[in-house]
Image (cartoon, rainbow, N blue to C red):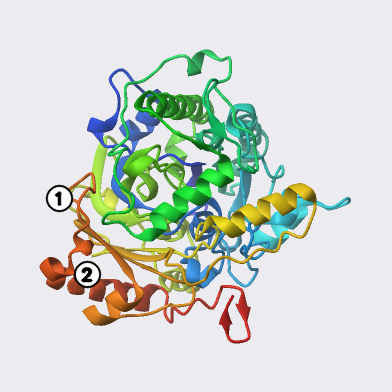
Amino acid sequence: MSHAEKRLPYNILLITCDQLRYFRDDEWPEGFTLPNIARLKEMGTSFDKHYICSSVCTPSRASMYTGLHTPVHGVFDVSMMPVGSPDRLPPRHKTLGRRLKEAGYHAAYKGKWHLDQELAHPPQGFDVAREMKARYGFEDYDGEVSSRMLGGYYQDEGIAASAIAWLRRQGRGLNNGEKPWFLAVNFVNPHDIMFYGHAGQEKNPGNRLSIPHGEPEHEVYQPQWSITPNHWQQSLTLDRPAAHLAFRDANDFFIGSVDYTLDDWRRYNSFYLNSTRLLDRQIGRLIRELEEQRIMDKTVILFTSDHGELAGAHGGMKGKGPVIYEEAIHVPMVMVHPDYRGGRRCPALTGHIDLVPTILGNTDMAPELRAQIKALPGHDMTPLLANPETGKLRDALLFAFDMLTFLDSNPLQTFLMNRKRGASTAATPNMDRRGLIRMAFDGRYKFARYFAPSRYNTPETMEALLAHNDLELYDLEEDIQETVNLGADPAANGELIIGMNEKLNRLIEGEVGEDKGEMLPRRENGPL
């Protein structure tokens, strides 16, 4: 094939939103639509069992852009919190941006980054765009956006506008010069739900990082949708890990607490869904721009979310944290590819750990660079597009959660009150509380060990399991709403528990390696 006949590698557009969970078809309220996300599904393939590999925003995004699990990349928490992660993604890890540059792409980034405190709060004279390119390989960066009060409402339209302007100026010129592009567009919504609180609610203000807000005066927020959180009155103390109650207490202090009625939760969920409708409009603007430029047949599109939202489910929990529930860790993933027909669904197990290999699998990387990608724990999802209904990528998925902020609320209260007074913000959580998670999901059974930061362990027997871990085990074929914790009854479910524990140990060994919490801040004799 001559140079004139050689096809330029596909452009790649990655659209990421913040805090949108996966909804089963029977969970959407009557009359609710997301027409532009629906268009992506019509044009592409929906991956119906796609999961994050860590939570919250920062650890999840670190995995998305490195292809590594939290214990490997080391970004285990939000860096501004009491015992937080490093101030930025460690430079020793090669990011997607740097790998794309090696593959001959111009990699651009718009919107929320959330992986570098210096980029978020630059000192005087600091060149944000230059440092983003130097540190992470992404070009044309406009700077960090705020995800505080109504951050999506105020900023997502501008993020879309910046992306569209880039497509018209840089993107078109790159393709004319026979260079493919990658564009990451990172929206804030529906993250606005994090600080929602409507007028008239009796709210304990705590010492929040942001004040609560109600619905903006905008037509998109007017509809109220009939949706009831999954088991919103469930007990958090009977057969659930203690980490769940600790999380709810810490979260209530972090963003304020409300004694929610069912009507309150329905209003909360209506705001969440309406924030997603506003997001959908911005996605529509991107699709229309690709169509107007007539490059849909030259562009691979991926759409996903960094994590989900509990929205009152499982005992009135909200947000995201130390849980393995579907609402929190199951997220949408849609892939539109010019070589494959759309409107199909794939039930294979996939996860954010697969994002880097999938994106790079659609480039013309040199063989030696492709070999580096094969060393990552994830897999290229693209081959599944040929036969999505029957394809398979793996036997099980790994989820690793090492966040310290939600271990208990006492140091969080100290941290927030001291910060408010301008005093020292040093605060150490109780490192003997079981709030870290290792989970394996094989498509039917979801098994998790909750353990303390001071007690990283790789148990092989039931005795060792119960000595240092709280257990969760759900059968999603029989119990899609995750109401019966089989792990709370090891006498009746011992064989299944041991089998899933062995599966989890194999996943950790293969995808993480030695798992001892080396990334956590440490004293001389061990973790803080």
Q: Secondary structure at mark 1?
A: loop
Q: Residues within 10 Å of mark 2 (few under 14, many from 20)?
A: many
Q: Position of residue 171 (x, y in %)?
A: 61, 39
Q: Secondary structure at mark 2?
A: helix
Q: Is residue 402 above or below residue 176?
A: below
User: Which residue position holds label 2?
Assistant: 500
Q: Mark 2: which amino acid?
A: Met
Q: Residues within 10 Å of mark 1 (few under 14, many from 20)?
A: few
Query: Where's the C terminus, which quadrant?
Result: bottom right
Side of 274 relative to 176 (left or right): left
Q: How many marks?
A: 2
- Res 429 quadrant in image: bottom right
Side of 187 relative to 322 (left or right): right
- The circle drawn on residue 445 is none
Nearest the viewer among 440 and 347 is 440
The residue located at (65%, 63%) in the rendering is: 427
- The circle drawn on residue 477 is 1
Nearest the viewer among 462 and 294 is 462
Nearest the viewer among 354 and 388 is 354
Query: Where's the N terminus, which quadrant?
Result: bottom left
Side of 496 relative to 457 (left or right): left
Q: Is residue 312 above or below residue 89?
A: above
Can residue 151 be seen in the rendering of this structure?
yes
> Farthest residue in the right direction?
125
Can residue 7 be seen in the rendering of this structure?
no
Q: Position of residue 489 (x, y in %)?
A: 17, 64
> Farthest residue in the bottom direction?
525
Q: Position of residue 9 (x, y in %)?
A: 48, 51
Q: Mark 1: which amino acid?
A: Glu
Q: Position of residue 6 (x, y in %)?
A: 47, 51
Q: Is residue 177 above or below residue 296?
A: below
